[in-house]
Image: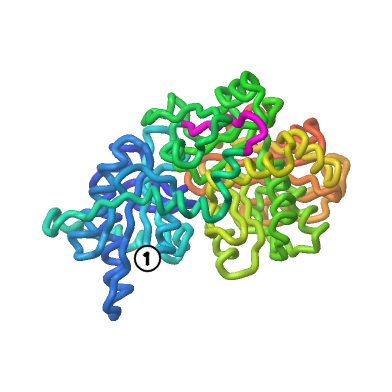
């Protein structure tokens, strides 16, 4: 995640973010917009046609005004900029960059708390690659924003139908809604997905919660992780639902709660989805997953003789693979899922619809579907913990190499079969159990992830991470 430090504009894992009125201001938005305009002017200097830019926003405080400011700066630079007439999920803007718009901009801070806002840049149906955001960063740093309104202001258009049509073209939405075998709870977490609560989620079997427009997100971060999903878990139990789904603030991330009210980890969701898609679509391509993802999907790929590759954390790395190679399924640990035949982009609404289709086709609850996976591929207990540190670790790679040198031959009584320093240090044991330690590049945080076949070992593995990194075991574990 990018952040704003000392007036520096930096695009991180997925975009630029800052605290509103401190690191995220009109001035910063104007600078980034001018930076994008300067980038386009230079990049398309010899081209008769400059790319059109679509600007969207989610339901955050002042989102529409920041988006209008961005679009008007582009218009003042004689570019064609079109502003969405209402909040949209981020994947909808990604979609528009495959339908005549050369670049897309979303004013969103995704799953961050309400006092953040940010800018995501989209291109070719996904997050703009680092080569593009790095250039826009450079231009933004030097940018002198045009005065507005020198031109007519940017045009405003409704794009809701375009995104609804896309979803309908990928899945038979009306048929799914008509045939749901029981209640399903959809938790919008007050985010942009709720803009489609009528158009898409129209079944009488769907129970909608946190759909109202609340820029404070009910006082929590709109991040679909276990400690934010108490209302969803309660609603699933109360309505004896087949399952519950949650979408984050800009609806590109997805979470799942089983019929028993159990939060399912991404390492449990991905195998259910992957196995179902392989049966449904007869995919033959590679499985691409973030280094922070689990072994069940890897075992499924192996069982189907499919190639497997890990990428650094950040969906843009998976999107790159999906654009340039034959990838059947792409997944990251923070709740991003994508598969062949769609955009190379995570999409929470599409993932929710696919789980609903799964219920219609199999007539099975989530706990029954997951039982099948466990029987075939084994158990998974995955936990992620973030620890605060005294100071940030600037060089992730040297951190990883240093710890790798200190490793014993065995951990938890098992041989170490592999280590990976692609993004932090990942230690893999002979039984597939693994531990990943990733320092955040931007803040004094150590992110630790572990997956084993029983909860006790996973806990031990995470405690071991603290010892290996010389963190005091009293280090405060931040809720994740």
Tell me which residue sits at (58%, 42%) in the image. Answer: 352
Question: Which contiguous range is marked in magenta?
Answer: 179-189
Please give the residue where the numbered disc 1 appears in the rendered image. Answer: 100
Q: Residues within 10 Å of mark 1 (few under 14, many from 20)?
A: few
Most extreme residue toward the left is 150
Residue 454 is left or right of residue 282, and the answer is: right
Q: Give 402 or 430, whichever is nearer the viewer.
A: 430
Do we see residue 468 in this rendering? no
Decide: is 414 above or below 344: above
Q: Residue furthest bottom?
A: 46
On screen, residue 217 versus residue 138, left or right, reads right
Residue 329 shows in the view: yes
- Circle 1: element type: loop
> Quarter-wise, where is residue 142 in the image?
bottom left
Up the image or down, 131 lies above or below 412; here it is below
Quarter containing the C terminus: top right
Q: Residue 158: horizontal and vertical position, in percent? A: 32, 49
Whether residue 392 is in magenta: the answer is no
Residue closest to the eye, 173 or 345: 173
Q: Residue at x 23, y 49 (%)?
A: 69
Left of 129 or right of it: where is 332?
right
Q: For residue 335, what is the image quadrant?
A: top right
**Colour convention:** rainbow
Q: Position of residue 303 (x, y in %)?
A: 83, 57
Left or right for 195, reference 72: right
Asked whether 184 falls inside the magenta stretch, the response is yes
Q: List x then y, in percent, for residue 218.
A: 43, 25
């Amino acid at each position: 995640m990018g952040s704003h430090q000392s007036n520096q504009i930096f695009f991180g894992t997925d975009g630029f973010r800052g605290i509103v009125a401190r690191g995220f201001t009109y001035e910063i938005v104007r600078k980034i917009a001018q930076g994008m305009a300067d980038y386009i002017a230079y990049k398309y200097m010899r081209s008769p046609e400059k790319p059109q830019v679509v600007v969207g926003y989610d339901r955050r405080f002042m989102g529409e005004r920041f988006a209008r400011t961005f679009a008007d700066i582009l218009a003042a630079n004689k570019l064609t900029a079109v502003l969405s007439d209402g909040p949209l999920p981020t994947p909808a803007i990604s979609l528009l960059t495959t339908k005549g718009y050369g670049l897309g901009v979303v004013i969103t801070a995704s799953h961050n708390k309400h006092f953040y806002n940010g800018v995501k840049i989209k291109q070719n149906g996904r997050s703009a690659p680092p080569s593009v955001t790095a250039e826009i960063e450079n231009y933004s740093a030097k940018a002198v924003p045009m005065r507005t309104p020198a031109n007519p202001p940017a045009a405003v258009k409704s794009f809701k139908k375009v995104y609804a049509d896309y979803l309908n073209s990928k899945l038979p939405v009306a048929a799914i809604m008509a045939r749901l075998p029981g209640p399903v709870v959809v938790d919008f977490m007050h985010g942009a997905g709720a803009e489609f609560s009528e158009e898409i989620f129209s079944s009488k079997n769907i129970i909608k919660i946190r759909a109202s427009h609340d820029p404070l997100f009910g006082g929590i971060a709109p991040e679909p992780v276990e400690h934010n999903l108490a209302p969803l878990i309660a609603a699933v139990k109360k309505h004896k639902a087949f399952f519950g789904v949650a979408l984050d603030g800009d609806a590109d991330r997805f979470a799942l709660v089983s019929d028993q009210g159990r939060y399912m980890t991404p390492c449990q969701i991905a195998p259910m989805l992957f196995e179902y898609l392989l049966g449904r679509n007869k995919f033959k391509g590679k499985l691409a997953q973030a280094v922070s993802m689990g072994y069940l999907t890897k075992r499924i790929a192996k069982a189907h003789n499919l190639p497997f590759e890990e990428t650094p954390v950040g969906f843009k790395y998976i999107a790159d693979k999906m654009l340039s190679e034959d990838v059947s399924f792409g997944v990251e640990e923070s709740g991003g899922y994508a598969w062949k035949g769609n955009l190379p982009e995570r999409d929470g609404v599409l993932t929710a619809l696919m789980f609903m289709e799964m219920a219609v086709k199999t007539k099975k609850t989530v706990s029954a579907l997951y039982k099948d996976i466990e029987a075939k591929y084994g158990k998974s207990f995955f936990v992620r913990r973030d620890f605060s540190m005294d100071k940030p670790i600037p060089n992730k790679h040297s951190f990883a190499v240093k710890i790798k040198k200190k490793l014993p031959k065995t951990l938890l009584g098992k041989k170490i079969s592999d280590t990976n320093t692609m993004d932090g240090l990942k230690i893999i044991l002979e039984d597939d159990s693994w531990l990943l330690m990733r320092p955040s590049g931007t803040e004094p945080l150590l992110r630790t992830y572990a997956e084993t076949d029983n909860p006790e070992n996973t806990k031990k593995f995470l405690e071991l991470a603290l010892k290996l990194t010389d963190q005091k075991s009293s280090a405060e574990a931040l809720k994740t």
